[in-house]
Amino acid sequence: MLSKHPGPSYSKGTHRTSTPWSKLHFVSELTEHIKVKAQRGDDAEEDTEFVRFFPSFVWAVRDFTLELRIEGQLVTEDQYLEHALALRKGNSKKVMDYNLPRQCIRSFFPIRKCFVFVQPVSRQEMGQLDSLPTSALDPQFLEQTRRFCDYVFQCSNVKTVKGGILVSGRRFGALVRSYVDTIRSGQVPCLDNAVTAMAAIENEAALREALAHYAAGMAGLQLPAELGELSVAHGMCEADALRLFMQLSFKDEEQGFQKRLVAGITERYANILAENEAVSEQTCRVLLDELSAAMQQKLSAGLYSQPGGYQAYDRDQNQVVENYRAKPNKGVKAEEALEQFLASKKAEAEAVLKADNLLTEAEKHVAEEKQKAELLEQQRKVAEEKQLQMEQLMKDQERSHQENVKQLEAKVAEELASARQEAERALQSKLKEQEAMLQKGFAEKARLMEDEISGLRREINSSSKTNFLSNLFSTIREGLRAVTSVSDLLTSRHQWGKGTSNPSKTQRRK
């Protein structure tokens, strides 16, 4: 606030009431032009809410030529301001009109500061002020300006809205648009509604940025990869994405946006797992075709159709399996691809065995049983591989849930602490104002503040109770568990995707 001689001012013991305070009638109309809650309460309740997020009150008095004296005693600038805000006793209209803007300032702005500035240059030079060098300005004015700037830069708090939520530049822009749109529609701006609208915009952006962060982190993976490698990368990228979301989001009612984040990450991880399976399967098939190419040539040349051919066929196939197992980086479909390969060769092996006249019927029977046992053993390995993979996915899901709960609990606890600090600041300002009222003899006004003070104390106490936090966190845990699991998505994708093309890397990294 900038003014020339705010009254009442004192000089040589003579009292003069000047006009600036009377011009502050708009302060008393704040509650008529802005609401805190969508459902309006009584005025006392609104006053308490305004105190939580209104800024500090700085009164800058320009061209100050008087002495800072009250009843002949030198006072500080802040004492000068508080004296100017002192209320008068009485119930007449004149007294009430005098008190109203002062009472509103005292109620709405618990932190108040005053700075006085002498005239920067002589009256004759005022018209050239813009072109004068700094050296031409009054040294006292420069010192006063330095103190003013130091206070603004060092003591000003970051702008917040209800709940102690910090307002960034982007959030402030959303708030301003909401206020302007509401005013243009002829309605009274409501802070709760504006913050809710701002939260929806910010949380949507936080969701997009977190999902993009996760996708970027997972995009560097080389496929095919073992499930353990994917699991580690997924856990790290998910935790990072969650941290980013928690930093950017606020007022996420019932964790709606976080659930969408969990579902989005789950879907993207399922896409990566599906692609990894497809790449692994293709890699294994190509490898088996390469390793068995020599056998196919021998088979086509009739080398296995000669007496003793089955023994050579069995030896070559065992070598293919051995070479296949020795190759690294086959991925999660290694055993299943081998099982499908061996199953596809079953009829071929039976034909070679049947044509081998060198073997007796008993030897052929033994060979058939050996084939069945090897195929069954491979099927057992496939089932074991799938079971281990499913167990890993369940571990991933539980780890994801625990990470979500841990980070959300930390954020909720931080938000509750911020709201509690906000309420404590409001309580302290009310207690300070109540004490000032009592000291000045306004016992009735002090008594009327008791309901506000009691309400603030109840709010502070309730938010600190262990059972309240326990119930809240229990609700959070159950809510997050309702999100679809990776294993469910993979199962449905397998059922739906039979006969369809595999997801591409481009799809995976969107």
Image (cartoon, rainbow, N blue to C red):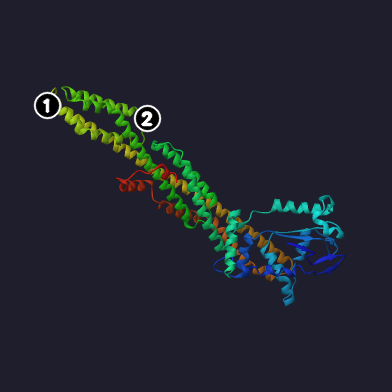
Q: How crowded is mark 2: few (under 14 residues within 10 Å), some or many (20 or more)?
A: few
Q: Quadrant of the N terminus?
A: bottom right
* C-alpha gap between disc 2 and disc 1: 40 Å
Residue 332 visible in the displayed image: no
Using the rendered view, name the quadrant where residue 364 is placed.
top left
Residue drawn at (17%, 25%) of the image: 305
Estimate the x, y position of residue 113 in percent, counting from the top left: 73, 58
Q: Which residue lies furthest to the left in this view?
A: 361
Judged left or right of residue 290, residue 442 is right
Amino acid under label 2?
Pro
Q: Which residue lies furthest to the front in this view?
A: 301
Q: Is mark 1 on a helix, strand or loop?
A: helix
Q: Mark 1 points at which residue?
A: 361
**Across the whole image, how many numbered discs are drawn on residues?**
2
What mark, if any, has residue 328 been given in the picture?
A: 2
Amino acid under label 1?
Glu
Seen from the viewer's position, the closer of residues 19 and 461 is 19
Estimate the x, y position of residue 158 in percent, counting from the top left: 64, 53
Estimate the x, y position of residue 107 in percent, counting from the top left: 67, 65
Seen from the viewer's position, the closer of residues 182 and 412 is 182
Give whichever of discs 2 and 1 has the lower sequence position.
2
Residue 173 visible in the displayed image: yes
Residue drawn at (52%, 53%) of the image: 205
Q: Do the residues labelled 2 and 1 touch (CB within 8 Å)?
A: no
Q: Is residue 251 above or below residue 182?
A: above
